[in-house]
Every structure is written in C-alpha cells, then in structure tokens.
Image (cartoon, rainbow, N blue to C red):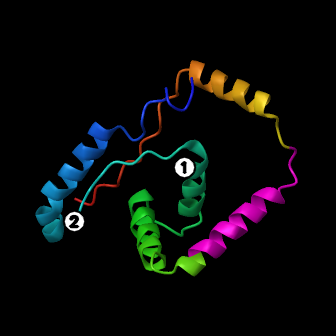
C-alpha cells in the first residue's frame, strides 16, 4: 500500500460529522458542560491508575478535567510547547533501552493487528445517592 492508496485519516465524513455535532451541542454545553467517553491505551491507562492510587486524582474524569485545563492554559505559549517537544525528543534519543529494527517493529505491529483486542476495563463512579 502506498501513501496514495491509504485511506484519508480522519475520514472526511467522520470529521464533518464531528464538526456538525460540536456546532449542534454548543448551546447546551455552554449551559451544562459536556460528558463523553474516552478510551486510553494501556500505557496511558496504567499511568492514570498510578496517579489515582497515589491520591493525585479521585477518578479518571477529574484527571481529564485538570489535565485538559492545564493544556488549555499552555496552548498560547508556543515557546513552552516547543521546549516540551524538544525535551521529549531528547529523552527518546537518550533512552538507554536497545532499539528495534524497522522489520521487527513491522512484525510486532502485524502480530498486534492479527490478535483480538482484549476488552478494556471500565471505571465505575461511586454512587453518591
């Protein structure tokens, strides 16, 4: 498959539907906020559970609230975002773990795509009633 054969991502129909839904929800969101479902891949989910176990957050929704707020505050500061990206790249380059070849990575990705995905865990909020 070449780049020209690859399907466009995000799918234009999905993107148009998301934009339309955002426009449609705007007034209701302005009054009552927004609830949504989110999936975290295992590495992010484990990181989040560690933070919850350490008492930094009560639950995933509080973490999303705080972290998105921090992201919003950082958004206007392009110099800080560039510095964070630079440090992330440097940390990856300085990682002492051995690298893997492109062939090995391709094989791992093929194996992952063949295997069925395990069912993700679901966080249950404690009822306060």
Question: What label sits on residue 45 in the rendered view?
Answer: 1
- Would you say residue 126 sits in the magenta stretch? no
Q: Position of residue 83 (x, y in %)?
A: 65, 75
Question: Outermost residue toward the top?
Answer: 114
Label 2: which secondary element: loop
Q: Is residue 112 left or right of residue 62?
A: right
Vertical order, 72 against 117 (above or below): below
Vertical order, 124 against 115 (above or below): below
Q: Nearer the viewer, mark 2 or mark 1?
A: 2
Residue 85 placement: quadrant: bottom right
Vertical order, 41 against 76 (above or below): above
Residue sitting nearer the eye, 35 or 54: 35
| Residue ID at (47%, 36%) | 120
Q: Is residue 19 left or right of residue 58?
A: left
Residue sitting nearer the eye, 91 or 125: 91
| Residue ID at (16%, 66%) | 32
Q: Position of residue 114 (x, y in %)?
A: 58, 18
Q: Position of residue 112 (x, y in %)?
A: 62, 26
| Residue ID at (50%, 30%) | 4
Label 1: which secondary element: helix
Q: Which residue is mark 2?
A: 33
Residue sitting nearer the eye, 90 or 97: 90
Report the predominant secondary structure element of the magenta stretch: helix
| Residue ID at (57%, 51%) | 44
Question: Outermost residue toward the front?
Answer: 4
Q: CA distance from mark 2 to mark 1?
A: 24 Å
Q: Which residues are magenta?
A: 81-98
Q: Position of residue 59 (x, y in %)?
A: 43, 60
Residue 62 placement: quadrant: bottom left
Q: Closer to the N terminus: mark 2 or mark 1?
A: 2
Pointer 1 local density, CA inside 10 Å: few below 14, some 14–19, many at least 20: some
């Amino acid at each position: 498959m070449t780049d020209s054969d690859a399907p466009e991502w995000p799918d234009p129909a999905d993107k148009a539907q998301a934009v339309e839904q955002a426009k449609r929800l705007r007034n209701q969101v302005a009054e009552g906020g927004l609830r949504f479902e989110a999936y975290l891949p295992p590495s992010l989910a484990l990181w989040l559970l560690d933070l919850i176990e350490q008492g930094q957050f009560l639950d995933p929704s509080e973490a999303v609230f705080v972290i998105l707020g921090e992201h919003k505050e950082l958004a206007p500061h392009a110099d800080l975002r560039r510095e964070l990206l630079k440090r992330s790249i440097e940390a990856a380059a300085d990682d002492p773990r051995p690298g893997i070849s492109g062939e090995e990575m391709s094989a791992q990705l093929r194996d992952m795509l063949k295997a069925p995905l395990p069912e993700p865990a679901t966080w249950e909020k404690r009822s306060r009633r």
